[in-house]
Amino acid sequence: MERKVIVSAAITGAIHTPTMSPHLPITPEQIADQAIEAAQAGAAAVHIHARDPRSGMPSADPALFEQIVTRIQAGCDAIICLTTGGGLSMTVEQRAAVVPRFQPELASLNMGSMNFALHPMAKRHAAWLHEWEPLMLEASKDNIFRNTFGDLEKILAMMAQAGVKPELEIYDAGQLDNAAFMVAEGLLKPPLYLQFVLGILGGMSATLDSLLFLRQTADRLLGPRNYQFSAFGAGRMEFPICTASALMGGHCRVGLEDNLNLARGVPATSNAELVLKMRRILAEFSLETATPAEARAILGLKGR
């Protein structure tokens, strides 16, 4: 197959809060509808979190995920990638429950424990729509996102049993060593799918140097033929890192989970807007975006 770039859309996430953007999808219907619109705009895959429809707080409620997944599947053919990252207040068991319940084609897996700090964002607003928003952001100063080796083993076993391909979220170079260890232990089987996540405080910064270092490290530890990779930068570095990733032979992820602006000072009103901008940038470099069927073939997914 002629090389195609997979564009993924991360629809709502668990980082941004309702006060930060009126366009952030909250209810199951809003999340699903924005996922469908992103797919119609050219996203081959959609990355899904759930939120409490009343408060907007990140949620692990399987009933909410079921509404979202069912509506997306009825409305488009996009690959559904469910989160096992969830939110900072969730247990490992809560976060991983979507794997056996829904058995998606893809599911994210953070490849290690880390400081996942959002507290600087608490200074950006003087008034909040919900009391929980600044409390959650401030609490991240003393929070550790947990994914121990024991946790990784359990979740990977669940994924293997359900036929789910893990999308390995790499926030720091040492997490590539974790992935290589899991390959050596037989718990991960190449070719892997790596998602380089840059710009989260506690992980690597969103710079071209960071992206290049991760790519070189992955080549050294895993072998260049043993993985596919995607990348994005949080906030204003979303499009620079996505573009660099595509030019380096990888794929890219955009979406309101990672970035709320279409351009400097211009809020994005939907995930579809971000997808369309990314496709325009790729087209300027004569790079074509993959369809869901092509993305399934590239990643070796089981299909719907």
Image (cartoon, rainbow, N blue to C red):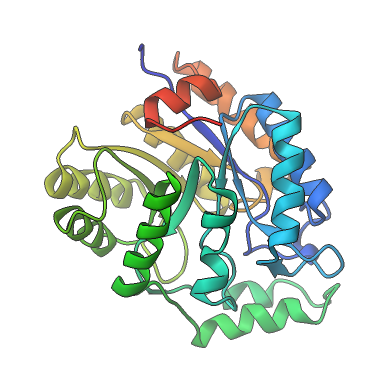
User: Residue 162 versus residue 36: which sits nearer the camera?
Assistant: 162
Percent of width and height locating residue 173: 26, 59
Task: Give the farthest residue toward the bottom.
Answer: 142
Percent of width and height locating residue 174: 24, 64
Question: Which quarter of the figure is the C terminus placed in?
Answer: top right
Percent of width and height locating residue 135: 69, 84
Q: Is residue 304 left or right of residue 190?
A: right
Relative to 198, say whether 55 is above or below.
below
Percent of width and height locating residue 1: 35, 12
Q: Is residue 103 left or right of residue 160?
A: right
Relative to 152, say whether 245 is above or below.
above
For the image, the number of numbered tags is 0
Relative to 23, say whether 76 is above or below.
above
User: Residue 82 versus residue 211: which sits nearer the camera?
Assistant: 82
Q: Is residue 215 left or right of residue 100?
A: left
**Residue at image point 79% right, 57% down:** 26
**Residue at image point 74% right, 62% down:** 51
User: Residue 200 versus residue 188: which sits nearer the camera?
Assistant: 188
**Residue at image point 54% right, 44% down:** 104
**Does residue 290 appear anywhere in the picture?**
no
**Does residue 241 appear anywhere in the picture?**
yes
**Residue at image point 78% right, 52% down:** 25
